[in-house]
Image (tube, rainbow, N blue to C red):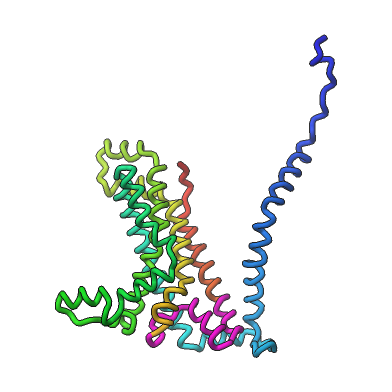
Amino acid sequence: MSDALARPARASRPRGVSHAKESFAAYVFLLPALCFFSVFVVYPMLRGMYLSFFKLAGRRMTFVGLKNYVDLANDPVFWRSLGNTLLLVVGNVPIVIVFSLFVAATIFRKRPFTRSLLRGVFYLPAVSSVVSITVVWSWIYHPRYGVLNYLISRAGAEPVAWLGDPRFALAAVLVVMTTLSVGQPIILYVASLGNSPESYVEAAEIDGASPWQRFRHIVWPLLMPTTLYIVIITTINSFQVFAIIQLLTSGGPAYATTTLMYQIYERAFQIGDFGQSSALGVILAVIIVAISVVQYRYFKSDVEY
């Protein structure tokens, strides 16, 4: 009899014990991230919901129930800021999707060096300081010395107070938001186009499908998972825009660029009403969650490639 047969068989480790040890190890590695998330995300969120039912005066807290929400419902500035926020979201998200997809499809067919160079150029604003880019745009919009008004005056038109006129201020903010928002979507779309099966498009082309039909029925469904991520992230970032407005307009003129996020800051740190500020935060969170759920159900896809 060989040594292998003579050697007593080792007792096999129960599968449940092995699985439990693996799960324990996974939770140990996840523990720092979970602690960070709990301390800096979950706790502030719950604390904000709690404070929204109180009136704060210094260190005194007086329970007022839903009064903060009722006061906001009767506040015309709240409705104006909500409208401005929705306009920015509705304007920014489609522009980012269409522009990013167009640029990605354009540079995807370029040579590798050219494609990498263009991706870096378009991604540069995404990794640059929001403050520095916004300051540059403030000089572009300057009513007297700005490049934009210089070009307009060369065309024979009168200069425009882009940030001082309620008719143009929100559109000016939207342009800056779009500039800062397209970098990452372009990179993601280029990567998704590279991972999409080329054979599907070639088969449709052989069958006589037009370029629009190939895009509509083949390329676009394959890009749906990426589009879902881009839509949700861009929507959340559009709702939370603050630094651009703070640096360009400070919510003016005449509340033309005041958003929910800027009003949260204004109520808390300029007026000192942390109760209403917390109520605004809860309202903003509910709106973001509701819209994200709708977007997920509309854009979700079972496509895998």
In the rendered image, residue 260 lying in the magenta stretch gets the answer: yes
Q: Is residue 300 left or right of residue 107?
A: right
Q: Residue at x 69, y 48 (%)?
A: 26
Q: Residue furthest top?
A: 1
Residue at the image position 58 percent from the left and 84 percent from the top: 276
Vertically, is 69 above or below 5?
Answer: below
Q: Position of residue 300 (x, y in %)?
A: 47, 54
Give above or below for 268 relative to 127.
below
Q: Relative to the observer, which residue lies in front, 140 or 169? A: 140
Which image quadrant: the C terminus? top left
The magenta stretch is: 253-282
Seen at 55% across and 71% down, the residue is 285
Residue 222 vertical placement versus 100 (above, below) = above
| Residue 73 within the magenta-colored segment of the rendering | no
From the viewer's perspective, is 95 left or right of 74? left
Residue 167, quarter of the rendered image: bottom left
